[in-house]
Amino acid sequence: GKEEGEFMVVTGFPTSSDIWLEAEGKKVAVVQGYKAVSTRKERSIEAFGQSEPVATIAGQKTYKLELTRLYATDDAISDGINFHNLENFSLVIVKPDRRIVYTGCQWNEIAETGELSEMVAERITIAAKKRVETAG
């Protein structure tokens, strides 16, 4: 049996201390894996009489992230926080050479499996407003 607070470590995946969700300054969940997709809409500037656009302006960036295997922290559980009532949270990813923080996050989809007593989500898809990367 697994001890409470013990995490399965899967080789090739970041350890639970490397990726986490933060809400109101508190670590509310640790995340085992993630996939991030950044997109940017572009706007073309047309000119009368020209067959090709004369310029392209970079539009707003959007960030979509798919998080796998999320475990709620003891703090979150004791505060009654669950994945469904999280709003405007942050995702922190710590890599050996840098730290990436996605802020203004909202969830789009939550897939849960397992026991009701466990605060574990199999997969959560989120949208973030901002991405900040700092050398670490």
Image: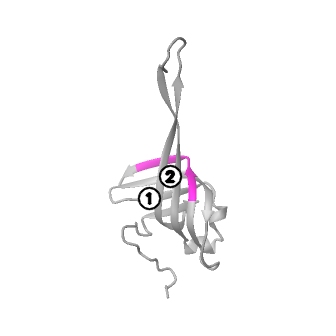
Which of the pair 117/92 is nearer the observer?
117
Which of the pair 41/6 is nearer the observer?
41
Which of the pair 108/84 is nearer the observer?
108
In this image, 54 relative to 72: left or right? left
- x and y percentages locating residue 124 in the rendered image: 57, 61
* Residue at screen point 40% across, 67% down: 13
Could you classify mark 2 by the number of other residues whose Cα lies within 10 Å: few (under 14), some (14-19), or many (20 or more)? many
- x and y percentages locating residue 58 in the rendered image: 49, 32
- x and y percentages locating residue 32 in the rendered image: 46, 67
> Does dot 2 land on a helix, a strand or a loop?
strand
> Does dot 1 land on a helix, a strand or a loop?
strand
**Residue 84 to residue 38: above or below:** below
In this image, 135 relative to 88: left or right? left
- x and y percentages locating residue 126 in the rendered image: 57, 55
- Decide: marks 1, 2 in contact (CB < 8 A)? yes
For mark 1, what is the residue? Answer: 93
For mark 2, what is the residue? Answer: 102
Q: Residue at the front extreme?
A: 51
**Mark 1 belongs to which amino acid?**
Ile
Q: Calculate the distance from the C-alpha at mark 1 to the C-alpha at mark 2.
A: 8 Å
Q: Which residues are magenta?
A: 125-133
Is residue 74 something that shows in the picture?
yes
Q: Residue at the left extreme?
A: 97
* Residue at screen point 39% across, 50% down: 134
Q: Residue at the top extreme?
A: 49
Magenta highlight on residue 20: no
